[in-house]
Amino acid sequence: MKSKHKNIFFIFGITILVIMASQLDYAQVREGISHAGYWFVAVLALWAALYVINAYTWYLIIRSTGDTKNIKFGWLYRITISGFALNYATPGGLLGGEPYKIMALSPKIGTERASSTVILFAMTHIFSHFWFWLLSAILFIFVHSVNMALGIILAATIVFSLAGIMFFVKGYKKGLAVKAMNICRHIPGIKNKAAKFIEKNKDSLAEIDSQIAALHNQSKTTFVTAVMSELVCRILSALEIYFIVRILTPDITYVDSILILAFTSLFANLLFFLPLQLGGREGGFLLSGSGLAIPTPTTIFVALIVRLRELIWTAIGLLLIKIKD
């Protein structure tokens, strides 16, 4: 990737990060880190491991589409962290990290293959979220009593998750690149540009879709492994909540941590248009915590530590952009 492009991504991400960091109450931050102690270091280390799983999933997808001799796993791990950092800092999520990853990977395997593997990874990452939300809603029913209000919420979550799973299964079979661009043709403000882009790149988009469909239709083992890898990553990431809540109270199980993460991430992702999901994640913690009878001060503390972890890893990811390939 050219240096000027790296600088654009870096400056954009740092600008958003500074804006987000300026919203913090630093007295509360110091108190939170002091109270968390070595558990805060454990949370940061946990995410270093989780990003390894993300990079492994992406590597599997790249390998399924062709040769990987030009791609070192350490390099891919770095690009994965930077991609997530840009996604955290970008309103709309995928608008920052995915273009960066495509531009970084294109010189090694070509633009079309890079685009298809990045889209496939993004699809797999989101697809695993729908499975995580579905399984968590079912798990809640088995481990907690359910009243009318909770029953409605859980039913809505199950229906929403199943709809998302069905949508992505169709996308895997036929590809999503052309479909996504056709949707853009109906969005005011960009529909004319989208129409021109489709006309100019229709062959490339069709090739990307054929490669997306190939993973699902020809590489079943890779497809299942990639989805399971991301789903395991979602489940392991609940350790973050478990570590933090245990600082304040021993009265939490790992299952409850999974449930808190599931419904917090669902609520936050419904507000995907906010950079760093500002406010959405905190609101999700409060709602899911209250549903499991966890005291409000505890959920506020969890939200603070998670927000700090996100900011630190976002800063790390942005700094990694500046490393020469």
Image (cartoon, rainbow, N blue to C red):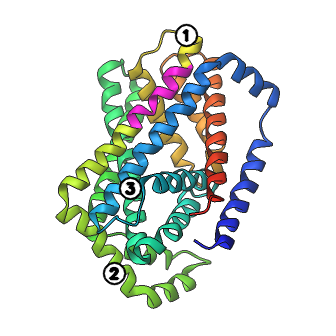
Q: Position of residue 296 (x, y in %)?
A: 62, 19
Q: Earlier in the sequence, mark 1 or mark 3?
A: 3
Magenta stretch: dominant secondary structure = helix
Q: Amino acid at mark 2?
A: Ala
Residue drawn 75% across and 20% down? 31
Q: Which mark is residue 190?
A: none
Quadrant (top left/top right/bottom left/bottom right) for the N terminus:
bottom right
Q: Position of residue 18 (x, y in %)?
A: 77, 49
Q: Amino acid at mark 3?
A: Trp
Query: What SS does tag 2 mark?
Result: helix
Residue drawn 58% across and 14% down? 247
Viewer-closest of 87 and 50: 50
The residue singled out by tag 1 in the image is 249
Quadrant (top left/top right/bottom left/bottom right) for the C terminus:
bottom right
Q: Earlier in the sequence, mark 3 or mark 2?
A: 3
The residue singled out by tag 3 in the image is 58
Query: What SS does tag 3 mark?
Result: helix
Q: How many marks?
A: 3
Using residue 130 as the reference point, say whether residue 27 is left or right of it. Answer: right
Query: What SS does tag 1 mark?
Result: loop
| Mark in the foreground, 1 or 3 | 3
Q: Are marks 1 and 3 in contact (CB under 8 Å)?
A: no
The 10 Å Cα crowd at callout 1, few under 14, some 14 to 19, many 20 or more, is: few
- Which region of the structure is painted magenta? 234-244
Between marks 2 and 1, how big is the CA–CA gap? Answer: 54 Å
Q: Amino acid at mark 1?
A: Thr
The residue singled out by tag 2 in the image is 206
Between marks 1 and 3, how big is the CA–CA gap? Answer: 37 Å
Q: Position of residue 260 (x, y in %)?
A: 47, 28
Residue 173 appears in the figure? no
